[in-house]
């Protein structure tokens, strides 16, 4: 429920702090006093867009803050989804700067307008005389019947299964589509894989083959140079090894008389060993270097095969070909396993569909059973609002398709006159009749569903006398189950409130300001007397006001 509303620098309001109470609260005031301004401030809290024109003082920002007790409203999912702190008291604040920039907060955490609208819809319902579009809303009609039918929990359980079924059914469709796509290209994928498997690719093979091909292609030239290198190192007359041996002998003789020469000798001996090893390797490489036309042809074909595959598959190396081969194997393995996955998923979907049908059937039964009782209740309520000849028909229609609320569509047929068969409300009901019908519907809902605070904005326009009195009684009864606030010009309705606020406009030729005050018992008598007789309060008007308020002299 709405506990407190604070308004700063909004339109004609400089500063207002209002405490709201449980039950049925009345708001009255002369035309133009600022009742619509109060509603405008509440609309901003509910997420309406703001303009700088709302600032009373253009040099100051506008701040509107509302405090709600949300215990029992079951808003946990909203706070979790939006990463907001949930507390028993929820504070919603809207700030509009001098530049027109708007900021919104829920429990001091910045939020966007959509988040504010979502929460606002769960906290306050502002209903005007012409606000009857809800009757065209399928979810509203379902909510209307499910409360009295006592199947809110059943519907919530059904909704959980429905959402689970939708996700699983979507996954099943994806698997089937995936299987269809792979099936179309499976032969081609198999051909590609077989071609790669036949190639028997090895990691790094292309580089090795190209190196070997290069060697065999120039075998004769390489052999000439290697033999020349052998000659240089091993010639018996002036080969490097012979010369190094002579060097060692000279250094060895010098070392007999000069200890410093020993280090030079050691180095020369190391060089001799290195050159002997080098000569050995040159000879071995020379022995291997022989022309082999057959092997050269094989290498050429192998290199061509690998390069052709690289070009065909638009990759840059044989390593990437091996990666592609592994990917193809994986995709084909997945294709082979999709059938079993689809069977398993289909079984899961079928099991949940069975549960869904059962829950939907239970919902349908409960809804159909309560429809007649609701028809009687609505006719009785409409009679108290001056529509004794009305007839109502509530049809619970079973649809072919499931949705989040079950497998039903609820139709409300209406007739205001005897002898006329009930028909679609939008085709036969006037604005006043629709307004009263909506009031009756919400009266029924209030006794079985946790509705948000409801504000009726002059819903009583066009009614008077006994009808107005009946409407006031209905609003008072609704106030026993929920917080009801009504802006009214009718004394019959104003007298039924458990709390009474008055909107007044005051000021001088330089400035005008709207104020809102809570009326005392005596002030209520005068206010209602004024609504009966005008500004000149007579004793008779006061007496009638007391009678409406059920105050004894």
Image: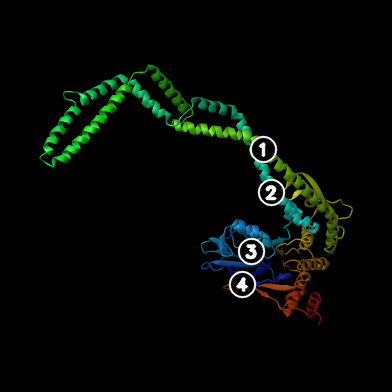
Check residue 40 in the rendering and tell me which mark sits there, or answer none. 3
Q: Nearer the viewer, mark 1 or mark 4?
A: 1
Q: Which residue does the image show at 70% across and 46% down from the upper left?
A: 165
Q: Earlier in the sequence, mark 2 or mark 4?
A: 4
| Mark nearer the N terminus (3 vs 2) | 3
**Residue underneath mark 2:** 163
Q: Which marked residue is nearer to the observer: mark 1 or mark 2?
A: 1
Rate crowding at label 1 as few (under 14), some (14 to 19) or many (20 or more) other CA atoms within 10 Å.
some
In this figure, which residue is indicated by the disc labeled 1?
342
> CB under 8 Å between callouts 1 and 2?
no
Q: Secondary structure at mark 2?
A: helix
Front residue of 474/307: it is 307
Of the numbered discs 4 and 3, the one sitting upstream in the chain is 4
> First in sequence: mark 1 or mark 2?
2
Label 3 – label 2 distance at C-alpha: 37 Å
Residue at 80 percent across and 46 percent down: it is 398
Give whichever of discs 1 and 3 has the lower sequence position: 3
Q: Quadrant of the C terminus?
A: bottom right
Horizontal and vertical percent position of residue 122: 67, 60
Q: Looking at the picture, does residue 280 appear above or below residue 547?
A: above
Q: Outermost residue, bottom direction?
A: 553
Expressed as whole percent of the image width and height from the top left, the position of residue 400 reads: 77, 43
Q: CA distance from mark 4 to mark 3?
A: 14 Å
Q: Which residue is mark 4?
A: 16
Q: Report how far apart the C-alphas of labels 1 and 3 lie in the structure.
A: 55 Å
Mark 1 element type: helix
Q: Is residue 416 left or right of residue 212?
A: right
User: Label 3's element?
Assistant: helix
Q: CA distance from mark 1 to mark 2?
A: 20 Å
Q: Residues within 10 Å of mark 4 (few under 14, many from 20)?
A: some
Q: Work out which quarter of the rendered image holds the N terminus and state it.
A: bottom right
């Amino acid at each position: 429920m709405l506990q407190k509303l604070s308004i700063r620098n909004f339109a004609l309001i400089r500063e207002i702090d209002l405490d709201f109470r449980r039950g049925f609260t009345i708001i009255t005031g002369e035309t133009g006093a600022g009742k619509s301004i109060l509603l405008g401030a509440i609309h901003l809290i509910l997420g309406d867009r703001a303009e700088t024109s709302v600032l009373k003082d253009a040099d100051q920002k506008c701040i509107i803050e509302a405090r709600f007790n949300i215990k029992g409203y079951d808003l946990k999912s909203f706070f979790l989804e939006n990463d907001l702190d949930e507390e028993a008291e929820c504070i919603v604040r809207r700030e509009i700067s001098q530049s027109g920039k708007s900021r919104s907060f829920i429990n001091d955490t910045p939020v966007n307008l959509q988040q504010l609208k979502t929460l606002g819809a769960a906290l306050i319902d502002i209903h005007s005389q012409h606000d009857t579009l809800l009757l065209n809303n399928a979810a509203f009609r379902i909510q209307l019947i499910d409360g009295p039918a006592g199947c809110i929990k059943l519907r919530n359980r059904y909704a959980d299964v429905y959402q689970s079924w939708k996700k699983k059914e979507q996954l099943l469709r994806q698997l089937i589509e995936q299987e269809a796509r792979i099936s179309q290209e499976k032969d081609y994928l198999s051909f590609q894989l077989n071609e790669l498997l036949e190639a028997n690719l090895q990691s790094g093979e292309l580089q090795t083959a190209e190196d070997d091909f290069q060697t065999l292609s120039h075998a004769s030239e390489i052999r000439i140079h290697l033999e020349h290198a052998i000659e240089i190192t091993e010639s018996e007359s002036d080969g490097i090894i012979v010369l190094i041996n002579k060097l060692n002998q000279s250094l060895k003789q010098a070392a007999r008389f000069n200890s410093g020469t020993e280090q030079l000798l050691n180095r020369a001996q190391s060089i001799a060993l290195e050159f002997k090893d080098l000569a050995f390797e040159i000879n071995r490489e020379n022995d291997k270097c022989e022309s082999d036309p057959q092997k050269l042809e094989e290498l050429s074909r192998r290199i061509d095969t690998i390069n052709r595959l690289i070009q065909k598959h638009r990759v840059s190396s044989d390593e990437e070909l091996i990666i592609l081969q592994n990917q193809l194997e994986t995709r084909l393995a997945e294709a082979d396993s999709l059938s079993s996955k689809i069977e398993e998923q289909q079984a899961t979907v079928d099991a949940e569909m069975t549960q869904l049908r059962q829950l939907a059937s239970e919902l349908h039964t409960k809804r159909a059973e309560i429809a007649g009782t609701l028809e009687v209740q609505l006719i009785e309520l409409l009679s108290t609002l001056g529509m004794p000849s009305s007839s109502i028909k509530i049809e619970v229609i079973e649809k072919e398709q499931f949705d989040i609320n079950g497998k039903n569509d609820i139709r409300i047929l209406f007739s205001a006159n005897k002898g006329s068969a009930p028909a679609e409300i939008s085709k036969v009901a006037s604005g006043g009749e629709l307004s009263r019908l909506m009031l009756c519907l919400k009266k029924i809902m209030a006794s079985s569903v946790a509705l948000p605070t409801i504000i009726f904005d002059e819903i009583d326009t066009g009614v008077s006398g006994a009808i107005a009195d009946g409407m006031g009684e209905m609003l008072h009864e609704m106030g026993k189950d929920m917080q009801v606030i009504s802006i009214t010009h009718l004394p019959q309705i104003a007298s039924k409130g458990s709390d009474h606020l008055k909107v007044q406009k005051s000021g001088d030729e330089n400035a005008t300001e709207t104020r809102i005050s809570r009326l005392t018992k005596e002030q209520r008598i005068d206010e209602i007397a004024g609504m009966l007789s005008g500004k000149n309060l007579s004793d008779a008007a006061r007496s009638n006001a007391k009678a409406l308020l059920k105050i004894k002299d």
